[in-house]
Image (tube, rainbow, N blue to C red):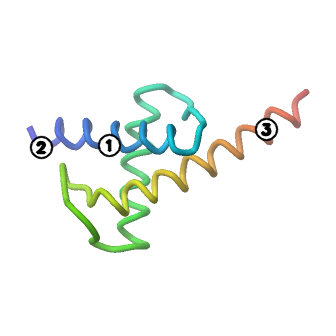
Amino acid sequence: MGWLWSLIIGGIIGWLAGLIVGRDIPGGVIGNIIAGFIGGWLGGVVFGEMGPEMGGFYIVPALIGAIVLVAIVSLIFRSMGRSRG
């Protein structure tokens, strides 16, 4: 049951990061979950344990990490799209 909760929270964090940045993560729901997990890990490494914890993620650093990740991924995909056309 813990994994299911982590998937839900990771997806929500990734979705919120996409809304804040104003860009969609490629892959839809799966992309949001991956962005939430990687962003949660990244934010935990950089900012440590800060704020409330839910589903194995500290919400504040996970959201900050996911926002940074979504911004970087969207810049990469945008630059790849320009170089093709």
Q: Which residue is mark 2?
A: 2
Q: Quadrant of the N terminus?
A: top left
68 to the left or right of 58: right
Gap in angstroms between the C-alphas marked 1 and 3: 27 Å
- Kind of residue at badge 3: Met
Q: Which picture quadrant has residue 21?
A: top right
Tag nearer the camera, 2 or 1: 1
SS at badge 2: helix
Furthest-left residue in this view: 1
Q: Which residue is drawn at the image coordinates 59% and 38% (left, top)?
A: 22
Which residue matches tag 1? 10
Residue 84 location (% of width, % of height): 87, 30
Question: What crowding class fits label 3: few (fewer than 14 Cα within 10 Å), some (14-19), or many (20 or more)?
Answer: few
Which of the marked residues, 2 or 1, is nearer the chain's N terminus?
A: 2
Q: Name which residue type carries label 1.
A: Gly
Crowding around mark 2 (Cα neighbors within 10 Å: few <14, some 14 to 19, many 20+) is few
The total of numbered circles placed on residues is 3
Separation (CA) of disc 2 from disc 3: 37 Å
Seen in the picture, residue 56 relative to 9 is either above or below; the reply is below
Q: Position of residue 13 (x, y in %)?
A: 36, 44
CA separation in Å, label 2 and label 1: 12 Å
Q: Which residue is mark 3?
A: 80
24 relative to 80 in the view: left or right: left
Q: In x, y percent, where is residue 58?
A: 27, 60
* Dot 2 amino acid type: Gly
Under tag 3, what secondary structure?
helix
**Quarter where residue 77 is shown:** top right
